[in-house]
Image: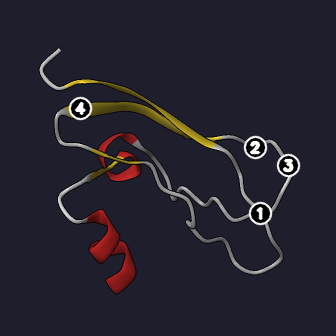
Amino acid sequence: SYTYHTVKGDLKDSFTESGKGTANTYNGKLPSFRIDYILYSPRFTSYNFEVSSLNHSDHFPISCDLFPAGK
């Protein structure tokens, strides 16, 4: 989307770099959507992007490991 690309700019997206599947983070009755992002500097590398199945809100928690690039 326009907003995603505007906010993302030159940052990297942890899901596109190290995620698998569809990364649906919306926990609602509508079709699944990815509404949460971890954006980070290109000076880092993302590993192990995950969407948790904890059901405590309308967002599923997301996480990833970030390390300095080249390490």
Residue at screen point 51% across, 59% down: 22
- The quarter of the rendered structure image containing the N terminus is bottom left
The three-letter code of the residue at mark 1 reads Asn
Residue at screen point 77% across, 63% down: 27
Percent of width and height locating residue 53:
75, 43
Residue at screen point 24% across, 54% down: 11
Closer to us: 57 or 52? 57
Q: Which mark is residue 53?
A: 2
Measure the alpha-carbon separation of dots 2 and 1.
9 Å
Q: Which mark is residue 59?
A: none
The relative height of residue 50 versus residue 55 in the rendered view (above or below) is above
The three-letter code of the residue at mark 2 reads Ser
Judged by depth in the image, the label closer to the viewer, 3 or 4, is 4
- Whichever of callouts 2 and 4 sits on the residue coming sooner in the sequence is 4
Label 3, secondary structure: give it: loop
Percent of width and height locating residue 17:
30, 45
Measure the alpha-carbon separation of dots 4 and 1.
29 Å
- Whichever of callouts 1 and 3 sits on the residue coming sooner in the sequence is 1
- Whichever of callouts 2 and 1 sits on the residue coming sooner in the sequence is 1
Judged by depth in the image, the label closer to the viewer, 4 or 1, is 4
- Left or right: 7 with respect to 20? left
**Residue under numbered circle 4:** 44
Tell me if label 1 and label 3 are in contact, CB under 8 Å.
yes
Quarter-wise, where is residue 43 in the image? top left
The three-letter code of the residue at mark 4 reads Phe
Percent of width and height locating residue 59:
72, 58
- Left or right: 64 with respect to 6? right
Label 1, secondary structure: give it: loop
Q: Badge 2, how many Cα within 10 Å: few under 14, some, many 20+?
A: few
Query: Does residue 1 appear in this view?
Result: no
Tell me if label 2 and label 3 are in contact, CB under 8 Å.
yes
- Left or right: 59 with respect to 43? right
